[in-house]
Image (tube, grey):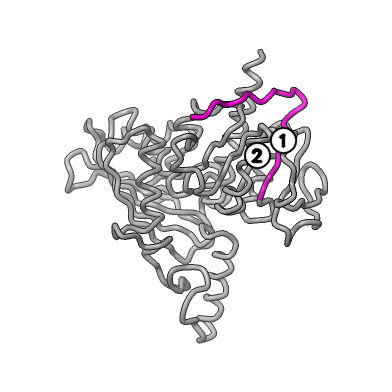
């Protein structure tokens, strides 16, 4: 990792820039910054030239959107990015030259060995208040590694297989709009021949492709999940396979996770392990019918788990269902948790 320069802690609060502030995740970042009470002395909202000059009401007053191409990061402590991979790659040198910490919600730096890939509850020890880049993992990876970390620490895990049921907001605001437009057209008997956003038309269907199909037969999304899980858990030996499916849901990702544990574990023990993990809640411990759904998870900071059961075809096999709001813990919330942890690191460093 490159030599990093500490960012001076200011007791008046952080100077924060939100790049991509007008997008679906950007707006949730603003919500999470307020909800998690990150001390902020100054905040800049940054977006593309199309939004520059417009205003946005925030908990810190009405702010004018600034043009990302012209924005000067000098004086910024923490820059939260959710404006697309190309924007992150283009502006990262400016952020680093200004001595700021860049928390990036795109795939631009997730595979870069120089920069950590962080879920605070899992590998938060990598967070420091220093200039550099911290990558936010893929939304579908974040919710799964919370559960995997809890079980790996308690009983050990060897094999992980996951099938995801990912909402259309995983493709951003345009993904949501595509679902709504296609649904209306389908109900009117005018279903489009192809989707403007998704691999296939998504209304009233499920599509087993998210991202390009690669030579391996996996999609880009599946490769992301497999790589990121190992990197975050620091388990290069872990065997992981993924099948990622887009479903006609507006918000929240759902997953079926099947794994093999090193030590035997009962359903009740597994439920307790998962429920005690920060950020997780098992919803059906007392009532088996109270498993979580995508609609139930929408707007929640917690990731929900249910339907924990023994896999009858694998020794020490365990299966569970896990659901999380992909715009929150899968994106904005995780990024803001990193920002809060970094700021606390700086504060504790001077005490």
Write the start and end of the magenta stretch as one range: 1-19
Residue 232 at what x, y percent from top left? 41, 36
- Secondary structure at numbered mark 1: loop
Query: Callout 2: 10 Å neighbours few (<14), some, many (20+)?
Result: many
Taking the spot 50% from the left edge, 54% from the top edge, the residue there is 252
Q: Residue 95 carries which label?
A: 2
Question: Mark 1 = which residue?
Answer: 76
Residue 111 at what x, y percent from top left? 44, 43
Taking the spot 56% from the left edge, 51% from the top edge, the residue there is 327
Residue 183 at what x, y percent from top left? 52, 75
Q: In terms of secondary structure, what is the magenta stretch mainly? A: loop
Q: Does the magenta stretch include residue 8?
A: yes
Which quadrant would residue 265 be assigned to in this image? top left
Which quadrant would residue 43 be assigned to in this image? top right
Is residue 250 placed above or below 128 in the rendered structure?
below
Residue contact between numbered discs 2 and 1, judged by CB atoms under 8 Å: yes
């Amino acid at each position: 990792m490159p030599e990093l320069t500490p960012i001076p802690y200011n007791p008046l609060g952080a100077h924060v820039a939100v790049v991509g502030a007008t997008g679906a995740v950007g707006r949730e970042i603003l919500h999470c910054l307020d909800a998690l009470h990150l001390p902020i002395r100054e905040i800049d909202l940054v977006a593309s030239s199309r939004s520059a000059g417009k205003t946005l009401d925030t908990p810190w007053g009405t702010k004018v959107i600034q043009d990302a191409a012209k924005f000067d990061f000098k004086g910024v402590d923490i820059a939260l990015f959710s404006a697309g991979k190309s924007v992150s790659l283009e502006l990262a040198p400016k952020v680093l030259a200004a001595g700021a910490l860049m928390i990036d919600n795109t795939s631009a730096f997730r595979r870069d060995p120089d920069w950590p890939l962080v879920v605070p509850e899992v590998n938060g020890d990598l967070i420091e208040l220093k200039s550099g880049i911290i990558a936010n993992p893929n939304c579908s990876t974040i919710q799964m590694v919370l559960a995997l970390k809890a079980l790996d620490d308690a009983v050990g895990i060897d094999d992980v297989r996951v099938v995801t049921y990912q909402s259309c907001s995983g493709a951003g605001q345009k993904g949501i709009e595509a679902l709504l437009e296609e649904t209306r057209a389908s109900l009117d008997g005018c279903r489009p021949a192809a989707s403007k956003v998704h691999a296939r038309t998504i209304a009233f269907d499920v599509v087993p492709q998210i991202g390009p199909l690669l030579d391996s037969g996996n999609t880009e999304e599946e490769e992301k999940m497999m790589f990121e899980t190992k990197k975050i858990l620091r388990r290069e030996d872990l065997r992981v396979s993924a099948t990622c499916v887009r479903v006609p849901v507006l918000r929240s990702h759902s997953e079926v996770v099947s794994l093999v544990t090193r030590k035997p574990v009962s359903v009740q023990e597994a439920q307790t392990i998962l429920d005690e993990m920060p950020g997780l809640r098992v919803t059906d411990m007392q009532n088996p019918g109270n498993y979580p759904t995508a609609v139930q998870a929408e707007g929640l900071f917690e990731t929900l788990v249910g339907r924990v059961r023994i896999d009858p075809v694998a020794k020490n096999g365990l299966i569970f269902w896990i659901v999380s709001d992909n715009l929150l813990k899968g994106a904005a919330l995780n990024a803001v948790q990193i920002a809060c942890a970094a700021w606390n690191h700086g504060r504790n460093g001077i005490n």
